[in-house]
Image: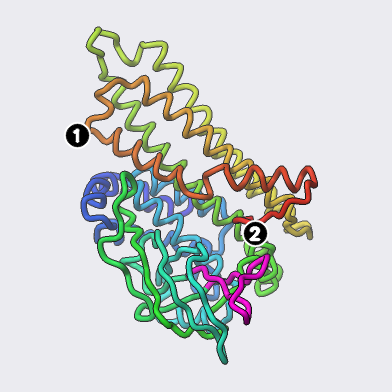
């Protein structure tokens, strides 16, 4: 177990106590942020020359799951914000120095959705737009935002010119009162707004080449940075989701041991609840093992001289989504058999279910874009394959 993960387990009681407080505040509490920073887990994918650990994605996934099982909102922030150092390792060295030069623990927010428009100007771009879901943004000093660059005539090319734009605090604003959700409230995933911000070219990255591994040459010889952005980011989202499921199961086991229904059925000996518990425990273990094994296999493939192909990326995404979906479905069955007491807001069970189901709505956990993309590629239908792949 890496020291970053051990630090989280040692702080488990505090993280659990801060769960509801984060939700009530609509952002991570100062105590929660302190624990995350002191664990240094955000440095797991950070390059060594930026004072990071540069460890395999599986080590990062374990840390994220540990955080999420004790405090789902903190785990979600850990997954999203913690994956950005991986991309930072591949950008222009000037940008890396600006972000990490004074403080290697600087956090970078997102989102990557291409919700902005940028016009090319001398030396860079002028960016405008408003983005939803900037997870953990209150505690970040930089943000990376997705945007489209129209053609000279104002049209959007196909495929589009889609870039990531890195902006320091002051070049963007956090939109107040813009985060109202049923779960993961403590992530503080507010909107961010940009108006006529100049972004130098060296603070931008092309999205599709990043997904295809084109920037890996910046860290040639390091397998970690030859991975696919789409797979690394999706693994981070999946890890946070599965960590929340681990926490939900811990709370469910504690609840089941004391539950006696109105008809005097003892929960821990009820075969229907035993069945549902067994299924979700097995599906969760399988999901974690499947995703981790794919990450390990990809790493071994890269170290043997291979590259991550589009077929591999699509297969990873297909399997990752299915792994998460099995857990979500199994958890729904478990809660359906838990009785009305599981819905009480005085118990953590219902809070975990809301957090888990909110996590399940992320594009990295949904099937609508992934399954058709994989099938169209595998079956050679000729249909365009876009989205997050």
Please tell me the numbered disc located at residue 152: none
Answer with the quarter of the image where residue 214 lies.
bottom right
**Which of the colour schemes (rainbow, by chain, secondary structure, one colour) is used?**
rainbow
Q: Nearer the viewer, residue 78 or 165?
A: 165
User: Horizontal and vertical percent for residue 97?
Assistant: 49, 82
Q: Residue at x 54, y 56 (%)?
A: 233
User: Pointer 1: what residue?
Assistant: 346
Q: What secondary structure characterizes most of the magenta part?
A: loop
Q: Nearer the viewer, residue 280 or 161?
A: 161
Residue farthest toward the left in the current orientation of the protein: 346
| Structural crowding at the residue carrying mark 1, measured as other residues with C-alpha within 10 Å and reported as few (<14), some (14–19) or many (≥20) | few
User: Horizontal and vertical percent for residue 345?
Assistant: 22, 35
Q: CA distance from mark 2 to mark 1?
A: 42 Å
**Residue 159 part of the magenta segment:** yes
- Describe the element under mark 2 as helix, strand or loop: loop
Using the image, determine if residue 126 lies above or below residue 136: below
Residue farthest toward the bottom in the current orientation of the protein: 122
Total numbered badges shown on the rendered structure: 2
Q: Is residue 323 left or right of residue 300?
A: left
- Describe the element under mark 1 as helix, strand or loop: loop
Q: Residue at x 57, y 92 (%)?
A: 122
Residue range corresponding to the magenta coloring: 145-164
User: Horizontal and vertical percent for residue 10?
Assistant: 33, 48
Q: Is residue 367 left or right of residue 214?
A: left
Using the image, determine if residue 224 lies above or below residue 72: below
Answer with the quarter of the image where residue 107 lies.
bottom left
User: Horizontal and vertical percent for residue 195?
Assistant: 39, 79
Quarter the C terminus occupies: bottom right
**Residue 210 part of the magenta segment:** no
Please tell me the numbered disc located at residue 228: 2
């Amino acid at each position: 177990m890496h020291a970053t993960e051990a630090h989280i387990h040692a702080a488990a009681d505090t993280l659990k106590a801060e769960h509801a407080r984060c939700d009530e505040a609509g952002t991570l509490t100062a105590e929660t942020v302190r624990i995350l920073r002191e664990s240094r887990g955000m440095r797991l994918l950070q390059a060594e020359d930026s004072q990071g650990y540069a460890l395999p994605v599986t080590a990062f996934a374990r840390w994220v799951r540990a955080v999420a099982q004790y405090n789902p909102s903190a785990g979600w922030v850990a997954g999203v914000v913690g994956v950005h150092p991986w991309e930072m390792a591949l950008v222009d060295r000037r940008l890396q120095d600006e972000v990490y030069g004074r403080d290697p623990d600087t956090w970078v927010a997102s989102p990557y959705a291409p919700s902005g428009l940028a016009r090319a100007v001398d030396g860079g771009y002028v960016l405008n737009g408003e983005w939803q879901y900037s997870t953990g943004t209150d505690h970040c000093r930089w943000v990376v935002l997705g945007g489209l660059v129209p053609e000279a005539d104002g049209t959007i090319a196909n495929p589009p010119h889609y870039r990531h734009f890195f902006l320091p605090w002051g070049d963007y604003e956090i939109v107040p009162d813009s985060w109202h959700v049923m779960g993961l409230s403590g992530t503080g995933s507010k909107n961010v707004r940009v108006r006529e911000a100049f972004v130098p070219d060296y603070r931008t990255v092309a999205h599709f080449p990043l997904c295809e591994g084109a920037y890996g040459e910046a860290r040639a010889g390091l397998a970690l940075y030859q991975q696919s952005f789409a797979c690394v980011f999706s693994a981070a989202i999946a890890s946070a989701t599965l960590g929340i499921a681990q926490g939900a199961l811990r709370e469910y086991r504690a609840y089941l041991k004391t539950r006696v229904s109105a008809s005097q059925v003892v929960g821990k000996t009820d075969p229907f609840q035993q069945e549902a518990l067994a299924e979700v425990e097995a599906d969760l273990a399988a999901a974690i093992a499947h995703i981790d094994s794919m990450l390990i296999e990809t790493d071994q493939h890269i170290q043997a001289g291979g590259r991550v192909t589009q077929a591999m990326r699509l297969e990873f995404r297909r399997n990752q989504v299915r792994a998460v979906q099995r857990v979500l479905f199994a958890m729904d069955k478990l809660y359906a058999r838990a009785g009305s007491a599981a819905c009480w807001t005085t118990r953590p069970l219902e809070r975990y279910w809301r957090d888990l189901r909110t996590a399940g709505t992320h594009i990295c956990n949904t099937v609508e874009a992934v399954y058709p993309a994989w099938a169209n590629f595998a079956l050679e239908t000729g249909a365009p394959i876009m989205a997050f792949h």
